[in-house]
Amino acid sequence: MKLKLKLDKVYCTPGVQMKLRDERNQQIVKWSLMRHQMGDWGNLGQEDKDTNDQCLESMNRILSAYNFINDQKGFLPSSGEKFWIITDAGHEITTVLLPSEY
């Protein structure tokens, strides 16, 4: 699948850095960044996905939503705590963050 979005600088907030101590979450974030680049916006409603598609052309902010691992349920990436990937307007900086860090 073709990349729709080139990621330049990628940063992780302190809350995400704590989550990345778990090797499984490192893989989830890497996989989610690839999905973000390919235009798979994760766990968003259709209206938000359509807005992101428009923002690819207009160079406005793009937000994707994914989930970390839930230790109680094993390797189920859709069952853990939510995290966001936000690419800023201009598409130069991308940040991986917890919603509480917004």
Image (tube, grey):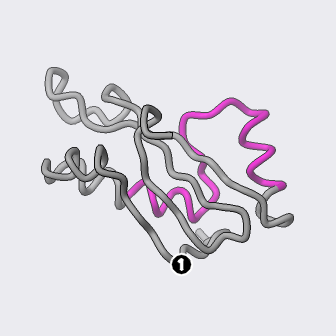
| Percent of width and height locating residue 52 | 74, 50
The quadrant in which the N terminus is found is: bottom right
Magenta stretch: helix, strand or loop mostly: helix
Q: Is residue 81 magenta?
A: no
The residue at 77%/63% (across/down) is: 56
The local secondary structure at tag 1 comes to loop
The residue at 72%/70% (across/down) is: 90
Specify the farthest residue to the top.
72
| Relative to 69, residue 51 above or below | below
Q: Is residue 36 left or right of residue 26?
A: right
* Of 18 and 7, the residue lying toward us: 18
| Relative to 8, residue 41 above or below | above
Q: Is residue 26 left or right of residue 33?
A: left
The residue at 55%/34% (across/down) is: 43
| Percent of width and height locating residue 101 | 43, 39
* Of 86 and 32, the residue lying toward us: 86
Q: Is residue 31 left or right of residue 57?
A: left
The residue at 13%/51% (across/down) is: 21
The amino acid at mark 1 is Asp
Find the magenta span and give its range. 31-54
Q: Which residue is mark 1?
A: 8
Q: Is residue 34 magenta?
A: yes
- The number of numbered badges drawn on the structure is 1
| Relative to 68, residue 10 above or below | below
Q: How many C-alpha atoms fall within 10 Å of the one at disc 1: few (<14), some, or many (≥20)?
A: few
| Percent of width and height locating residue 91 | 66, 70
